[in-house]
């Protein structure tokens, strides 16, 4: 008498559908090599130059963020100096500065040597080091004091103890941070394009817009994805070990040593100078230019439209993406099936995929579907010519971001609450609406905020998929900067940075509540550090 | 027909058979306790009845409706079976009132409010209506959980180890309180526990469970006094198993003659409870006190009998024997014993 037949489960089907919708288009990337094997040969120069530029970027940004992020994390973790609490958090602020906005600032001031691969390395290092800084700091703070004291007891000076014990223990976390920073650098389009560095994202853009060759664009995207996936795997491996290392470390936390005299002054001045350079100076300069642009009537005529477009796109995505992520996460929980769990993993693969790759992957199936619909209903460019395609790309790109924030909170709701509600007559949708949503409020708001900010900053996918007249603030910044109209670009850039400060401020506030040393232990803080926002184009 | 019927129920998790071909019947208004050691499958039984797990075989009938059976699985929300969880599982975002009213949302507002109020009165928490569940004590949380399960008027209430997360000092009082609430509500209830004292003192009938199956069902007095197997005798309280020769209504053992519940003959084993033995300190001796466990109102002695057997004897604490004393142990007057395997 076998009762173990499972009826068709709506939630499991939902998650599978979601996975197919999100990950499905990516299948087209490798397929493009089969469909038109020779497509890339027409752009034979593109691949070697992209490989070279990418390699230089990876080495430079990897080394730069490693040194800067680790040094700063060690400074605030192992040493005490005036204003440490403030500096500790001020050092996170560059997270709000998109690379292309800093580039606009640098180009506007005509900094010497900026238009080069080395210039791009510097820009990326300055805006991406917080990934390494945050993860390294979390690792340092979780280290047991006794380990460092043991090293001192064995005759090492404090500095050497940090180098020989503290640093190696934090290595998995630091490498994880470096991998995240590198993924951001790979995904970037704005900075490299404006600085004339010919990486993969730039090549995709040129192939797409100058040659309209979708097959070649897909093949370039596939090459870029392979590099990204390699980094992703490395990051996962590093993170897996980091968790292990942190679990092992229990006991008293490291007690910072007070710096005096010159070293204390340097410990205050150097980090502040860095934040001043990366955030303060650009904000001030953008402010000045903005005022000038308004006063002299240099504002782009489309400024109002692009602001409206940005707010609408970000706002709608901030509703749509978290809702999709919630249904996905809840589907996994409610159906408790392996298929659903695998589907969710698949659906969140967009995490870390460059926006240009997502755009290229999404356009082909949409175009196909559009032609079918047009054949029947005569609707024309229903999908690729409207915001529908853009929204689709945003969902693919940012679903994982929202999912991470929601999943973390969902895991903390005991399953017995679901059972209790079911026993009281609530069906599975009721449980979601009456138990989970109220309990997940913080996670949902966080997810919405993250998606809002990311969509606002997003450049490459928007650039490739926007409908006619659908410019956003990010595109306005990029457009004006390419034409050296820095004053015109200033106000939209300023708005993007100010909005981008919101989640960073929220993170600092949340951690302030949890107590400075427990930040990374708190689940909300953890979500932040584990899955820092992805797009920073 | 019984109000709740469980027939041939089986449920495995991979290799492990948690419940195997289990049968159980509960009458309307009855308070039934399933008593078994941890890991015997009693929580799985509850979860299958509640609908959180689907059985591999067998059926569950509640109030003449098949809620789980071949080709028919009613989801938990449609079963009218309430559950009180081990750690209560109260909704942290809702007040006491919100928790109790959770299962009543499909009713008109006035009825819902009235029913919530009445249920809170039943459990004696009318003054805590608007409280946050974090502000409640352990006992109060349990009463909220009970009220929440009772409010929709379920056909059956399930209680999963309801007292295990409470302090020992609170347990006795709350046990009585919960029993009275369930009886006031005229609820049919199934409680699972590993605590024999809890099961015996609370339930109308006790079902002893072992390795996924019910070993014995009966009123507490019967389960305690007439265990079906040696294992059941040992699990439901302490016991001495003595061998002897049965002759009609009596059995002769090395300690003397005990009365038998049912006539028998031949070589048998009988289960003798520690309180069915008594000690004399004067005259002949046949045993030595090896250990003494003083429990306040009574004392449990561990003796070594001259035949080499270890015996447990429970006596009121009026008169104490010391470890090392030589004593004479014999059947207490009117000690009626039962045969075991």
Image: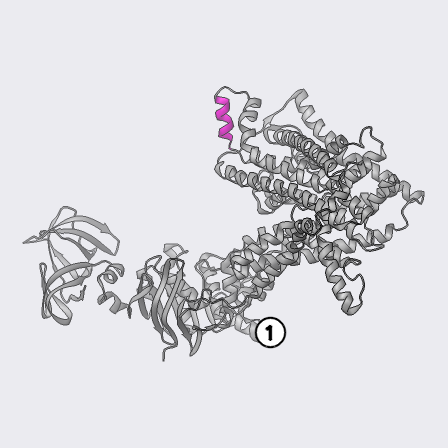
Side of B282 where B42 appears, left or right: right
Label 1 sits on residue? B109
Residue placed most toward the observer, B270 or A97: A97
Residue placed most toward the observer, A438 or A474: A474
Image position, residue A285 (x, y; %)? 83, 36
The residue at the far top in this view is A155
Q: Which residue is depicted at the point 79% across and 44% down?
A: A206
Chain under disc 1: B
The residue at the far front in this view is A38
The residue at the far bottom in this view is B1
Please state the extent of the stretch shown in magenta in the rendering: A144-153
Side of A358 where A147 appears, left or right: left
Q: Which residue is depicted at the point 81% across and 55% down?
A: A467
Q: Against B28, is A473 above or below?
A: above
Residue placed most toward the observer, A144 or A170: A170
Q: Quadrant of the C terminus of chain B?
A: bottom left
Q: Against A202, is B61 above or below?
A: below
Is residue A148 rendered magenta in the image?
yes
* Number of on-image labels: 1
Q: Is residue B100 among what the camera can see?
A: yes
Is label 1 in a helix, a strand or a loop?
Answer: helix
- Main structural element of the magenta stretch: helix, strand or loop? helix
**Around disc 1, counting alpha carbons within 10 Å, would you say few (fewer than 14), some (14 to 19), or many (20 or more)?**
few
Side of A482 where A13 appears, left or right: left
Q: Quadrant of the N terminus of chain B?
A: bottom left
Image position, residue A64 (x, y; %)? 68, 30
- Residue A58 falls in image quadrant: top right
Q: Against B53, is A97 above or below?
A: above
């Amino acid at each position: 008498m076998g009762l173990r037949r499972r009826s068709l489960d709506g939630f499991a089907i939902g998650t599978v559908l979601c996975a197919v919708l999100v990950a499905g288009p990516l299948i087209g990337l490798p397929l493009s090599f089969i469909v038109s094997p020779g497509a890339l040969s027409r752009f034979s120069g593109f691949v070697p130059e992209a490989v070279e530029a990418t390699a230089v970027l990876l080495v430079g940004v990897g080394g730069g963020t490693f040194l800067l992020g680790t040094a700063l994390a060690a400074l605030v973790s192992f040493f005490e100096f005036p204003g440490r609490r403030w500096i500790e958090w001020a050092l996170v602020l560059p997270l709000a500065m998109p690379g292309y906005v800093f580039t606009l600032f640098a180009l506007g001031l005509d900094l010497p040597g900026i238009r080069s691969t080395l210039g791009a390395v510097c820009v990326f290092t300055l805006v991406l080091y917080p990934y390494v800084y945050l993860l390294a700091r979390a690792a340092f703070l979780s280290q047991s004091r006794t380990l460092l004291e043991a090293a001192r007891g064995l005759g090492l000076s404090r500095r050497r103890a940090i180098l020989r014990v503290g640093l190696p223990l934090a290595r998995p976390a630091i490498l994880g941070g470096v991998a995240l920073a590198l993924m951001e650098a790979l995904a970037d389009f704005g900075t490299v394009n404006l600085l004339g560095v010919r990486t993969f994202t730039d090549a995709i853009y040129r192939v797409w817009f100058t040659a309209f060759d979708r097959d070649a664009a897909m093949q370039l995207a596939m090459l870029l994805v392979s590099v990204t996936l390699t980094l992703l795997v490395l990051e996962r491996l590093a993170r897996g070990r980091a968790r292990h290392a942190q679990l092992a470390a229990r006991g008293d936390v490291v007690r910072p040593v007070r710096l005096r005299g010159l070293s204390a002054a340097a410990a205050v001045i150097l980090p502040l100078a860095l934040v001043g350079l990366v955030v303060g100076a650009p904000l001030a300069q953008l402010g000045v230019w903005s005022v000038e642009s308004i006063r002299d009537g240099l504002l782009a005529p489309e400024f109002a439209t692009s602001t409206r477009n940005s707010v609408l796109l970000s706002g709608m995505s901030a509703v749509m993406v978290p809702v999709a992520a919630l249904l996905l996460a809840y589907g996994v929980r409610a159906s408790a099936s392996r298929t659903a769990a695998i589907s969710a993993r698949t659906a969140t693969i967009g995490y870390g995929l460059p926006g240009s790759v997502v755009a290229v992957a999404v356009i082909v199936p949409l175009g196909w579907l559009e032609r079918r619909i047009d054949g029947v209903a005569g609707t024309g460019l229903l999908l690729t010519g409207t915001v529908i395609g853009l929204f689709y790309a945003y969902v693919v790109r940012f679903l994982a971001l929202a999912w991470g924030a929601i999943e973390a909170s969902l895991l903390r709701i005991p399953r017995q609450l679901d059972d209790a509600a079911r026993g009281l007559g609530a069906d599975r949708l009721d449980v979601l609406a009456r138990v989970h949503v109220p309990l997940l409020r913080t996670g949902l708001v966080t997810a919405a905020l993250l998606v809002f900010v990311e969509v606002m900053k997003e450049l490459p996918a928007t650039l490739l998929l926007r409908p006619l007249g659908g410019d956003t603030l990010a595109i306005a910044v990029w457009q004006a900067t390419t034409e050296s109209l820095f004053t015109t670009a200033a106000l939209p850039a300023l708005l993007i940075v100010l909005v981008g400060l919101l989640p960073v401020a929220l993170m600092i506030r949340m951690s302030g509540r949890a107590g400075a040393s427990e930040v990374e232990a708190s689940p909300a803080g953890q979500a932040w550090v584990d899955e820092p926002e992805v797009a920073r184009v | 027909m019984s109000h709740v019927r469980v027939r041939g129920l089986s449920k495995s998790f991979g290799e492990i058979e948690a419940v195997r071909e289990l049968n159980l019947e509960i009458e309307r208004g009855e308070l039934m306790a399933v008593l078994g050691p941890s890991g015997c499958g009693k929580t799985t039984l509850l979860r299958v009845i509640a609908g959180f797990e689907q059985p591999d075989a067998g059926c569950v009938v509640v109030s003449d409706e098949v809620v789980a059976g071949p080709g028919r699985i009613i989801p938990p929300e449609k079963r009218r079976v309430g559950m009180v969880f081990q750690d209560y599982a109260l909704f942290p975002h809702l007040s006491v009132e919100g928790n109790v009213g959770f299962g009543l949302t499909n009713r008109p507002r006035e009825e819902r409010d009235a029913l919530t109020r009445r249920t809170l009165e039943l459990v004696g928490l009318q003054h805590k209506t608007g409280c946050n569940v974090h502000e409640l004590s352990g006992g109060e949380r349990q009463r909220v959980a009970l009220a929440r399960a009772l409010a929709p008027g379920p056909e059956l209430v399930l209680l999963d180890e309801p007292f295990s997360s409470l302090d020992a000092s609170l347990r006795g009082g709350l046990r009585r309180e919960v029993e009275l609430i369930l009886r006031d509500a005229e609820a049919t209830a199934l409680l699972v526990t590993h605590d024999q004292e809890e099961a015996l003192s609370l339930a109308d009938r006790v079902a002893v469970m072992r390795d996924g199956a019910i070993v014995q069902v009966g009123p507490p007095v019967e389960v305690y006094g007439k265990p079906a197997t040696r294992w059941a005798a040992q699990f439901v309280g302490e016991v001495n198993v003595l061998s002897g020769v049965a002759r009609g209504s009596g059995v002769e053992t090395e300690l003397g003659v005990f009365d038998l519940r049912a006539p028998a003959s031949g070589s048998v084993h009988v289960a003798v409870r520690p309180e069915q033995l008594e000690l004399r300190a004067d005259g002949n001796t046949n045993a030595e006190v090896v250990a003494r466990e003083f429990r306040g109102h009574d004392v449990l002695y561990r003796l070594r009998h001259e035949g080499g057997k270890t015996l447990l004897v429970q006596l009121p604490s009026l008169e104490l024997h010391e470890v090392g004393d030589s004593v004479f142990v014999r059947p207490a007057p009117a000690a009626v014993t039962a045969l075991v395997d």
